[in-house]
Amino acid sequence: MKIYLISLLLLCESVFINSLAAKKISNCDKLTYPGFKICNLSNKTIFIEHTKSVNNLTILNNEIDTIASKIFTKFSPENFYFQLFDRGTVYIRNISRLNGSNKLLFYGMCMDWRLTLNNSLAYVNPVDLIKNNDVIIDGSEDLLMKIKSSKNTNMIGSVLVQNNFKKINLMNGLCNTLPKIQTLTIRNYNSTSIEPIDFDLYKNIIMMEIYLHKVESLPSNIFNQFKHLQKLFITSPKVTSLPKDIFNNVKLLIELSADMSLTSLESGIFDGLYHLKKLTLFDNELESLPNEIFKDLYNLEFLELIHGEIWSLEANGFSNLNKLKYLDLSRNRLTQLSKNIFNGLNELEDLRIRWNGLRTIESSVFNGLHKLKSLKISCNRLGSVPRSLFATLDALLVLDLKSNRLTNINPGVFQNLHNLEVLDLSHNRQTHIDINLFRNLKKLRVLNLGYNSLTIIGEKSLQHLEYLQKLYLNNNEISVIEFNALPVKSVKHLNLKSNELTHDSLGKIKELTKLETVNLRSNKFSTLPDGIFRSCKKMKNVYI
């Protein structure tokens, strides 16, 4: 009896090899073969010989040092073209022993075929074309990859080149017979330089990813032929500066990401990038930004300046970014926010300034951010915030102030946040809750006061939060919950873990009729009051 499978992972070599040899497995659409120290891949390889309908073949963790020419010619033309290679995939990963004496040839490729080479190749000899639609790995040291198609120029839409060649020269990397290539990914871990790109092949590429781990500088004309490029992602941890004109010929960019070690940016480096909507500068060493660095980016909607060394921001530095909706300044060295920093950001909806060293914030710094919906200033060193800091943020939905040093917050600081739904004050130093602190937060659904120094939940301190559903009071020193302290009509999830609650102080929980989940672990009671959850008809989880 034969076994018909759509997808097969060969985990136990002997069982499946025996099944294949006995021709009990057929019509397998997807075959994943872990390798089991395969050294020679040929037509006699058992899964190649006995499985003729594979569309997707993956060979993992092998020790292949020989790959036979015309390895897939055993398939009939119909199977070969339409089942194996038409919209199919062949991945051969971790080829660690292939040397210059071997010829590697994938034969008979058709449209929409994707080739992924993820290996440790250092050198492979050139292979002559023997049929239309061939893919060749050309191993002269200055070549990455040569792909040719004498007739079918629509063959490939995406190319990934990942290897350890000692020299990269993209001028000869891909021949100009594939004008339909739109995505190019280049990864190299040994090269220390990269040559300019000067072939018409690249004129239709719209997305490019570059990972260069030892390259220390990029030529100013490296992207000159990428005039249709829309998305560019560069990772090169040893590059400390970029030429001012490096982006001069990629005017259609809509997304740019640079993960480097930049210590400075040339003024005007982004000039002319009028279409740019998303800019990420990640893991750099920038201490400040040049004046008017963003002056031409008036269509920018997303800006990340994260994991850097920025310690100051100039007034009006973002004033031209009238369409910006997202700004992330997290993981820098900012110690203060002065007025007028965010001037002009009239469309901003999400602002993140986490993991800095903020100690002071000017009271008017957020003025004008009328559309701001999410503000996250967590993981800083704020001991207090000005009473009017959030006065103009009437559209705010989420406010995150966790992991600061806040003590005894001014009762009026949240009074204008009428639409706020989520407030996180956890990991601070609050010792009590003023009766007026949350009075105007009529739409609040989530309140986190965990990891503070609260000892008592006073009468009516939280009662007026009529829409509150999740209340976190865990990891405090609470020993008393006074009468009418909690929002009895709405709370569904209550966390009182790790406090000082005793048997007598738990009685107020009876009033929470909509409670579904409660956590009372690590307190000082040995028994629960009788009928404490009797009125909680929807209770699902109790942790004690």
Image (tube, grey):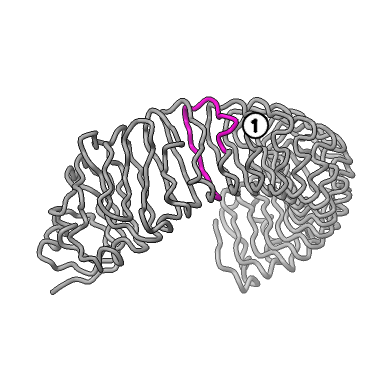
- Which residue is depicted at the point 72% across and 61% down? 445
One can see residue 7 in this view = no
Image quadrant where one finds the C terminus: bottom right
Tell me how many marks there are: 1
- Write down the quadrant of residue 49 in the picture: bottom left
- Residue 415 percent location from the top left of the image: 87, 53
- Residue 7 percent location from the top left of the image: 29, 64
Residue 514 lies in the magenta-colored region:
no
184 vs 457, nearest the viewer = 184
- Which residue type does callout 1 highlight? Gly
Residue 214 lies in the magenta-colored region:
yes
104 displayed left or right of 284: left
- Residue 132 percent location from the top left of the image: 31, 55
- Which residues are the magenta region? 206-223
10 displayed left or right of 237: left
231 displayed left or right of 64: right
Q: Which residue is mark 1?
A: 308
Image quadrant where one finds the N terminus: bottom left
- Residue 159 percent location from the top left of the image: 43, 48
- Write down the quadrant of residue 514 in the picture: bottom right
512 vs 52, nearest the viewer = 52
- Which residue is depicted at the point 57% across and 36% down? 259
Q: How would you rate the neighbour count of disc 1 (Cα within 10 Å): few for under 14, some for 14-19, many for 20 or more?
A: many
- Which residue is depicted at the point 65% across and 58% down? 494
